[in-house]
Image (spheres, grey):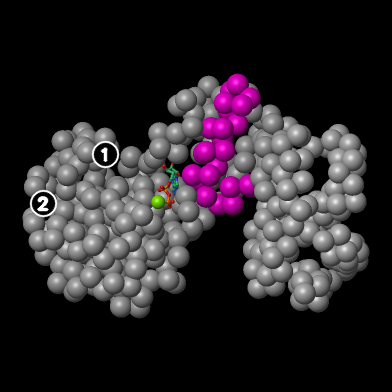
Amino acid sequence: MPQLVFYRKYRPQSFAEVINQKNTIKTLANALKQNQISHAYLFAGPRGTGKTSVARLMAKALNCENRKTNEFEPCNKCGSCQEINEGRAIDLIEIDAASNRGIEDIRALRENVKFPPLKSKYKIFIIDEAHQLTKDAFNALLKTLEEPPPYIIFILATTEPEKLPATILSRVERYDFKKLALDDIIGRLKYICHQENIKFEEEALRLIALYSEGGLRDAESLLGQISIVTNQNITKESIETLVGAINLEKIKRFIDILNKKDKVKAIEYINKIYDDGYDLEIFNKEVLDYLRKLLLLKISPGLAEILERELTQEELTVLFKQAQNWETNVLERLLRKLTEVQWQLKTSPVPTLPLELFISEELI
Ligand SMILES: Nc1ncnc2c1ncn2[C@@H]1O[C@H](COP(=O)(O)OP(=O)(O)O)[C@@H](O)[C@H]1O
Ligand SMILES: [Mg+2]
Ligand SMILES: [Zn+2]
């Protein structure tokens, strides 16, 4: 299933191919040209914006056997470049901090740092999701960052830089990766469609780009899935069907938060939905629809017949299960209030306020 790995197949192999991170690339390229290398970099920014890709490009450029002074692009031909492209370079160590969080892992890393690279100029550590390291691990890392041997380079990548300790932040050269612009994502999706002989409607690609919220990886994954489902012929309608499913997931999550009466989470969730560009009126209407279905099932499982027209058997099973967690009178109260909220949302001077008030007053 080659389509599923679009995001890997289309990983930029040169700095020139990286979209939308102009300032970062320019500064890194200049540093490479002048051989002004830092021993610790931090790449911060949302997922799917190129952090890992650029980290690997840096590693490639730094260890490229053909790169001359005043050049910055890796050649992609020498032994070192090829080993990195094929993921078998021994002097490039990639650590996923989400699964190697502990002190032992960092202790192993500290041992490893003591030995010079085996084949290349630099030994390079890429630590992904660096904010997930434990406190002890950070302390151990800090010791290495204080006096790194000249052949060692760390590249930390994170989606949540604010979770990194100040002591680490002060020792790294930081680059902020930005979300990609809609048109850039659309452009890249078009390029992939042409390469892969996928037929598409313009509007469909725009919808994919919208729903991926500035991250190219998600856009490419979605494109891959849709192209399989639609047999390489992507229509606007096919996207709407799939994206509808994504929306339902978002609603379900909110319903669960309401059920747990978690005011803080609920308010955070509403604000995230709003910040992500969703229309709160549509969101609220879908929440209403969902709670209504739960209420009908509460009144009588027999009423499922009414719902069967709109739902698949699997969706009904999920609904039945969720309905068990609710009291009928709570559903009635929330539904009545959310119906009022629906009207208030049209005129509220602060868009999120009607839902926030609802959460504050009713989640008791
Ligand atoms: N700025 C970008 N330019 C070109 N492709 C990108 C960019 N950002 C992400 N991609 C695409 O998304 C995939 C995943 O990107 P990655 O670098 O792993 O993102 P991150 O590490 O920021 O989550 C890449 O393989 C590439 O196909
Ligand atoms: Mg990454
Ligand atoms: Zn090379």
In the rendered image, the quadrant that contains the C terminus is bottom right
Horizontal side of 241 relative to 216 (left or right) equals right
Whether the magenta-drawn stretch holds residue 224 is answered as yes
Residue 222 lies in quadrant: top right
Which residue bears the numbered disc 1? Answer: 87
Residue 80 lies in quadrant: top left
Q: Where is residue 358 in the image (x, y as percent from the top left)?
A: 81, 71
Tell whether label 2 touches label 1 (CB within 8 Å).
no
Q: Give the range drawn in magenta.
A: 210-232
Q: Position of residue 197 (x, y in %)?
A: 53, 22
Whether the magenta-drawn stretch holds residue 141 is answered as no
Horizontal side of 204 relative to 176 (left or right) equals right
Overall secondary structure of the magenta section = helix
Horizontal side of 288 relative to 245 (left or right) equals right
Is 262 placed above or below 318 here? below
Residue drawn at (22%, 35%), measured in percent from left and top?
82
Residue 16 appearing in the image: yes
Which residue bears the numbered disc 2? Answer: 117
Q: Is mark 1 within 8 Å of ligand 1?
A: no
Residue 154 lies in quadrant: bottom left
Is 27 placed above or below 243 here? below
| Disc 1 packing (10 Å; few <14; some 14–19; many ≥20) | few
